[in-house]
């Protein structure tokens, strides 16, 4: 556990030396939400419906990108090989990363939620549930980023995993059209993608005033996706390479 | 146990070519062994095998009585790669603290190590802002904080000025005197003179395993560069 926390502290220290990334991580979702709010200025009821979904989407996408690029950088700089010769276990390495970006995600989601509720007057009955799902979405993004980075040799490749991993999820998650109105094949496929559960939860949170059992299912599904991706990332990390 | 590292029948293939065609060697505990040979002779591959990060076709590599790369050995073996492998966006001190924490080492050790590699004055500098030679020493310091029993140092003195190279070789001698085993690769033959024993590698084969004096006597010359050439030509013939 000590080594996991050492990993987490190191990743956050690296981030602390990069103020521009901190600003991007913390402020970008709020700025994008602001734009969204005024795009639908004439129809505020649409923003009330889509706004919460965006709060879930932005941290998911941003954390996926940040994590996969950071991890590939570790791989190409030779520090990953060095780490693999130390007592650090692979689970500790991946877990330390996930924890560090979960902390960043918490700060990001808290700021975004506060901005949406306080400044943009988004009408939400369960702000804490909104925050919890935003953090969870970001953690799933981080976990998928860790997994995707195992298949990227360069940062250039890592960035290109975004259209591959993220865009299909955006298309199928119910953001553009309710999932049950899609053809059966796509509807079936959408059940296997984490963003569908996040979007379901944010859609529900937009109108719900109590924590329903549907929300609990979404929560458990997202936790499951995060754990599966972290496990997959640990297993794809090979100590010995050619 | 007299040998820290034992390699038997080691075969490594990379990208379709055989880098190590079947290597046998042993490294004595508490000594400095120089691993010399031209670039491409398999020095780094051999070091990676002993560190336990190289995929091996066949053969065994035993370090301190256990397979290379085992959990116990990862706590006892320090590997310093040829390219400096520390975090450019952390300060020297933050880098060393991280590697100390991974090894479970006391933080007091960080100050000692900074003095040993003569970087105490720069401890709050970002590694990115250091010269190449300074970064090489940070990378070495990151291994020193863990206080390993076996050091695997891949070309640790490349790009350093003569005074620093001398200081580092003194440091290596101190470590060996305190009981550590060091395997130091280099392609500069005059560094062989500072080792207790020299392994000459050419095209993945061991062409000599002797003391520096033994090498000179064997080749009939005092010039180690010339000695290497003579031995290599004799083996090729």
Image (cartoon, rainbow, N blue to C red):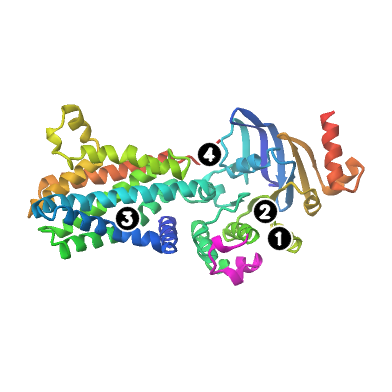
Q: Position of residue A184 (x, y in %)?
A: 16, 28
Mark 3–mark 2 distance (CA, rounded to whole Å): 37 Å
Q: Which residues, given as a range, are shown in magenta? A: B111-131
Q: Name the residue under label 1.
A: B168
Element class at badge 2:
loop
Q: Position of residue B77 (x, y in %)?
A: 60, 50
Mark 1–mark 2 distance (CA, rounded to whole Å): 9 Å
Q: Name the residue under label 4.
A: A240
Asked whether A28 or A89 is in front, the reply is A28
Chain of the residue displaying label 1? B
- Comparing marks 3 and 4, which lies closer to the viewer? 3
Q: Name the residue under label 3.
A: A102
- Whether label 3 touches label 1, CB < 8 Å: no
Element class at badge 1:
helix
Element class at badge 4:
loop
Mark 3–mark 4 distance (CA, rounded to whole Å): 29 Å
Q: Quadrant of residue A11?
A: bottom left
Asked whether the residues under marks 3 and 2 belong to the same chain, the reply is no
Mark 4–mark 1 distance (CA, rounded to whole Å): 30 Å
Asked whether B30 or B171 is in front, the reply is B171
Mark 4–mark 2 distance (CA, rounded to whole Å): 23 Å
Quadrant into which the C terminus of chain A falls:
top right
């Amino acid at each position: 556990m000590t080594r996991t926390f050492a990993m987490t502290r190191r990743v956050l220290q690296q981030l602390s030396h990069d103020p521009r990334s901190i600003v991007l991580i913390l402020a970008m979702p709020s700025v994008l939400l602001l734009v969204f709010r005024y795009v639908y200025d004439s129809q505020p009821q649409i923003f009330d419906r889509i706004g919460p979904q965006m709060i879930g989407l932005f941290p998911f996408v941003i954390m996926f990108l940040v994590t996969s690029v950071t991890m590939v950088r570790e791989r190409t700089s030779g520090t990953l090989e060095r780490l693999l010769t130390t007592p650090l276990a692979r689970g500790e390495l991946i877990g330390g990363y996930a924890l560090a970006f979960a902390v960043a995600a918490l700060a990001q989601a808290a700021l975004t939620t506060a901005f949406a509720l306080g400044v943009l007057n988004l009408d939400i009955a369960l702000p804490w549930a909104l925050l919890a799902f935003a953090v969870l979405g970001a953690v799933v993004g981080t976990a998928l980023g860790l997994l995707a980075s195992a298949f990227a040799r360069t940062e250039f490749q890592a960035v290109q995993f975004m259209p591959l991993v993220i865009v299909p999820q955006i298309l199928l998650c119910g953001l553009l059209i309710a999932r049950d109105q899609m053809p059966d094949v796509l509807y079936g496929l959408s059940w296997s993608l984490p963003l569908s559960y996040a979007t379901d939860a944010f859609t529900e949170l937009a109108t719900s005033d109590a924590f329903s059992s549907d929300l609990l299912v979404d929560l458990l599904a997202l936790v499951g996706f995060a754990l599966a991706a972290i496990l997959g990332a640990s297993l794809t990390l090979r100590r010995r390479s050619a | 146990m007299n040998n820290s590292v034992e390699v038997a029948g080691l075969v490594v293939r990379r990208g379709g070519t055989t880098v190590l065609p079947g290597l046998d060697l042993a490294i004595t505990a508490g000594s400095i062994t120089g691993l010399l040979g031209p670039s491409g002779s398999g020095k780094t591959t051999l070091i990676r095998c002993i560190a336990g990060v190289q995929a091996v076709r066949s053969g065994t590599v035993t370090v301190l009585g256990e397979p290379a790369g085992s959990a116990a050995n990862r706590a006892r073996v320090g590997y310093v790669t040829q390219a400096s492998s520390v975090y450019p966006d952390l300060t020297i001190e933050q880098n060393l603290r991280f590697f100390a924490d991974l090894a479970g080492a006391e933080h007091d050790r960080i100050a000692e190590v900074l003095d040993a590699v003569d970087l105490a004055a720069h401890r709050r500098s970002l590694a990115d802002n250091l010269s190449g030679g300074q970064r090489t020493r940070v990378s070495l310091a990151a291994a020193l904080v863990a206080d390993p029993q076996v050091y695997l140092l891949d070309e640790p003195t490349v790009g350093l000025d003569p005074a620093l190279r001398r200081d580092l070789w003194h440091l290596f001698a101190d470590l060996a005197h305190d009981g550590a085993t060091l395997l130091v690769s280099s392609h500069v033959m005059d560094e062989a003179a500072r080792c207790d024993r020299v392994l000459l590698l050419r095209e993945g084969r061991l062409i000599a395993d002797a003391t520096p004096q033994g090498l000179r006597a064997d080749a009939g010359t005092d010039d180690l560069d010339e000695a290497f050439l003579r031995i290599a030509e004799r083996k090729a013939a």
